Amino acid sequence: MKIHDAVLIPGDGIGPEVTAAVLKILDAAGAKFRWTERQAGVVSLEQEGSVLPESTLGAIRERKLALKGPCTTPIGGGFQSVNVQLRKAFNLYAAVRPVRSLPGVETRFKDVDLVIIRENTEGLYSGVENEVTPGVVMSMKVATEDGCTRIARWGFRYAMERQRPKVTVFHKANIMKLTDGLFLRCAQQIHEREYPDVTYETVIIDAGCMRLVQDPTQFHVLLMENLYGDVVSDLCAGLVGGLGVVPGANIGDDGAIFEAVHGSAPDIAGMDVANPLALLMSAVMMLNYVADAAHDPAARPVAARIRKAYDAALAAGEKTRDLGGRLGTAAFADAVIARL
Ligand code: ATP
C-alpha cells in the first residue's frame, strides 16, 4: 500500500478512545496513513478559540482526506454543528452509510444489507432560521436543482457500480410539494436519462419507515434529503445492533471525511465501554476510497483483512457492551488485532 496523507480529528466525548482503538487496528493491519492530528469542536474551542480553526480547515484542504471522531453539537443554542460546517466547507454532498447485519449480533432481521445515501449540504440543515416576531420562529428548507441532481446522480452511479439493483427515494412531496417535489423530479430524470437499468422506486417517508421496520431486506439503496437521511440512519442502525455499528463517509468531488454515524455519547465517555466498530468500519471505507480515488488497489486487501477480523471477533462473541458483550473499547481492539 502507498502512504496516504490524512487528517485525524479525534473529536470529544467517546471520540479519543474509539480513535485510539481504530489507529491501533489500522497500524496492526498495515494501513499506511501519515496522520496529521487536528482538533475541532469543544476541544479546539478551548485550545484555539474556535470550533473549526484554520489549522484544521487548512490541513483538510491540503490533504483532502480525513478520519474524524464525533464532535458534540449543543442542543437548542450554542455554536453551529461542527459536523455540518465541515460538510459544507468542503462540499461533501454525499453521506454514504452502509447498514449491514453482523455475525454474532442478534437482531430481528438476519440479512439487512442496505446503503443510505443522504444529501449532506441542503434541506433544513441550511441553518437559515429566524424569529419572525416573538413567539413565531421559522426554519428554511432549501433545495436546489443542482444539489438534488448531483446527489441523485451520485446515488444511481453508486447503485450501478456496486451492483445494487434498486434505488428507493424517501420523500414527503405530498406535503413539501416544492422542495421534495424538486428532489423527486431530479431523481426521476437521472434515472430515466442516465441509469434506466437501475430499478427506481419512490416511497413517502412515513410509509418507508414502516416498511423498513417490517422488512428492511426489501431495500438496497435509500436516497433522501438531509434531515430524512439523519433520522433514517439511526432507525437503520437500530435494525443491525445500534449506533456502535454504522459507519459513514462524507464524500465530495474533491475530498472525503470519514466518520461514524453516532455522536459523542457523553454518557459513556472515558469509561472504556464505547464500541469502536463504527469508526473502524468508517476507516475501512476510507481504505476502499483511497483504493479508487488515489489509485492504490493495495489498500483494498487491507480493508478486507480488517473486515474479516472484526467479523470473526464478533462471531466468536467478542463484543462490546452495547452488543451484549463484555469487552471494553481497548480489549475489543485487541480481539480484532488477534484475528488479523
Ligand atoms: P451528540 O450530542 O454528539 O450527538 P449524543 O449522546 O446525543 O451525542 P449519540 O452519541 O449519537 O448521541 O449516542 C446516543 C447514545 O447511543 C449514547 O448516549 C450511547 O449510549 C449510545 N452510543 C452511541 N455511540 C456508541 C458507541 N460507539 N458505543 C456504544 N454506545 C454508543
Image: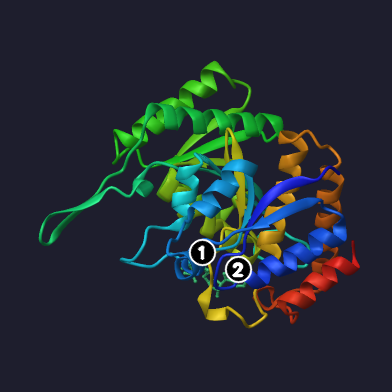
- Kindly identify which numbered label has been placed on residue 15: 2
Residue type at the position of mark 1? Cys
In the rendered image, which quarter contains the N terminus? top right
Ligand 1 sits in which quadrant? bottom right
Quadrant of res 14: bottom right
Percent coordinates x, y for residue 173 in the rendering: 34, 37
Residue 224 image position (x, y, % from top left): 47, 41
- Left or right of 42: which side holds 330? right
SS for dot 1: loop
The residue wearing badge 1 is: 71
Residue furthest to the left in view is: 133
| Residue beneath the point at 87% across and 46% down | 301
**Callout 2–callout 1 Cβ contact below 8 Å:** yes
Q: Earlier in the sequence, mark 2 or mark 1?
A: 2
Using the image, determine if residue 326 lies above or below residue 77: below
Q: Residue at x 79, y 66 (%)?
A: 24
Q: CA distance from mark 2 to mark 1?
A: 8 Å
